[in-house]
Image (spheres, rainbow, N blue to C red):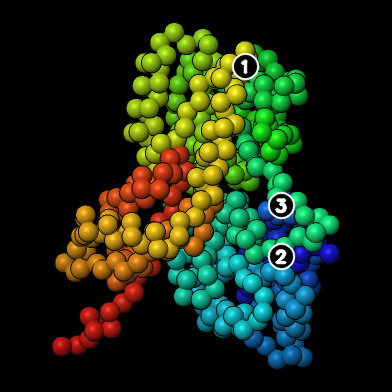
Amino acid sequence: MLPTLVILGRPNVGKSTLFNRLVGRKIAIVDDTPGVTRDRKEAEARIAGRDVRLLDTAGLEEAAPETIQGRMRASSEAALREADLAIFVIDARTGLTPADRAFATWLRRQHVPVVLVANKTEGRFGGQAAFEAYELGLGDPVAVSAEHGDGMGELHDAIREHLPERPEAEEEDADRPLRLAIIGRPNAGKSTLLNALLGEERMITGPEPGLTRDSVAVQWRDETGALVRLVDTAGLRKKARIEKALEKMSAAASIAALKECEVAVLVLDALLGMEEQELRLARLAEREGRAVVIALNKWDAVEDRPGTLRHLNDVLTASLAQLRGIPVVPLSAQTGRGVEKLMPAVREAYAHWNRRIPTGELNRWFEAMLTRHPPPLAEGRRIKLRYATMPKARPPTVVVFGTRAEQLPEDYRRYLVNGFREAFAMPGVPIRLQLRGTTNPYAEADT
C-alpha cells in the first residue's frame, strides 16, 4: 500500500493548485472561485523519492451536516481518517483566519502527523508572511507558492521526514540516490561533464549552444558505489532572451530540476568566469535551500590559473555571502582531468547540508556568540535572546527564541549566521535563521 497524503484547508487557499503541482500535471480544476473542489480527487505522485497516494479535498467549512458544505467537510474528514500524513494549507497572503485556527485546533486532536504549508508566499517578503502560522501550533510552516513552484524542494523535504517507514520488502532508503542537478548557461559544458562522470557518451554534445532542450535524468553509481540521480539541464539564459515557447519550457524544466535536487553543480566556463547569469542561478539555488558546488570547466584552456581563481573568489565573497565557502573544483570535462574531484566535493557538501547540531552544543555556541556581542537595542528597547534550536537540516535551519527577537537587525542576523557556519564548518550551504519573539507581559502594562 502506498502512503496516503491528504491536502486540507479552508476554501480558496490553493489546495488544488498544490495538488496539481505535486502530481506534476493539471488534474484538479483551479479557479479563484471558492468551493470549486467538491469531491475528493486522487492521484499517484512521486514525492520526496517515494511513490505516494495524494488526495485533494474540498475546503473545510463550518456547516450543518445536511448541507453541501457539511457533506464536503464530512468527505474531507473521512479522507483524513485514512491518511498517513495531512498537508494543512493556509493562505499567507490573506493571513490567519478564525477558520484556520479552528481547523488547526481540530487537527491537533487527530492522530495524524501534519505538515503546515503557508501558500502564496511569492515575492520578496513572501517568506516573512509565513511566520504568523507558527501560532497554529502545528510546527514549522513551509513557505511555498504552489502557482509559481517556489519552495517545492523544502516541501518535499518536510514530507519526507513524516512519511511512514517503508515495508521491508521495498526498503530502499539505505540506498536512496543523492539527487544532483547540473546547471549553468548554454555551452558551459554541462552535458560533456555528465558524459565524463558516466564514462560514456550519454548526452549529445557539440559547440552549438542549446543542444540540450529538456532536463534528462540518469541514475548511476559513483566511484564509491553510492547511488546518484543526476539531472542534466538545458542552459539557462537571461529571461529577456528567452523568446521561443520551446526554450521557455526548457527553462521551466531546468528550474524544476533545481528545486527538486539536493546538491546543484553550477558549471562555469573558466574562460568567462562568474557573470551575472551564474550569480542568478546560484542565488536561486540558495533561495531553494540547495547546496552548491562550482565546477570550473575548461580549466585546461586557462593560462593565468592563480589570477582566475583569485578573481572568482573575489566575486563569490562580494556577491554570494549567503553561500560563503562554496567549494570550487577546477576541471576539464573534455579531457577528464580533475573530474574525479567533483563527486567527493559533492558528497562533502551534501553531508554539511544534511547535518543537524545537538541542542546542547548549539546553545553553548549561542551563549558564546551573545557574550562576545550582545544584541543591540531596537527602538530604544532591549532585545533579549533566550535560546536556539535546530528543528531541521536540508538546509540547516536555526530557530532563535527571545523577547522581541523578530526586531533583530539584519547585521546581527548575519553575525549569527556567519558564526554558525564557521563554528560548525558548513561552507557553501544556505543557512536558514528564523526568529520567534515572545512578549514580556509587564512591558506593555499601563503605569
Identify the mark nearer the N-term, 2 or 3: 2
Q: Which residue is mark 1?
A: 336
- Compared with residue 36, is residue 172 higher up or lower down, i.e. above or below? above
Image point 75% across, 88% down: which residue?
A: 67
Cβ atoms at labels 2 and 1 below 8 Å apart:
no
Q: Secondary structure at mark 2?
A: loop
Residue type highlighted by circle 3: Asp
Which quadrant holds the C terminus? bottom left
Q: Relative to 258, is 123 on the left or the right?
A: left
Instruction: Report the disc number at residue 173.
Output: 3
Residue type highlighted by circle 1: Gly
- Compared with residue 144, is residue 444 higher up or lower down, i.e. above or below? below
Q: Residues within 10 Å of mark 3 (few under 14, many from 20)?
A: few
Image point 68% across, 53% down: which residue?
A: 48
Cβ atoms at labels 3 and 1 below 8 Å apart:
no
- Compared with residue 28, is residue 318 higher up or lower down, i.e. above or below? above
Q: Quadrant of residue 69?
A: bottom right
Which quadrant holds the N terminus? bottom right
Image point 52% across, 40% down: which residue?
A: 349
Q: Which residue is mark 2?
A: 164
Q: Residues within 10 Å of mark 2 (few under 14, many from 20)?
A: few
Residue type highlighted by circle 2: Pro
Q: Quadrant of residue 59?
A: bottom right
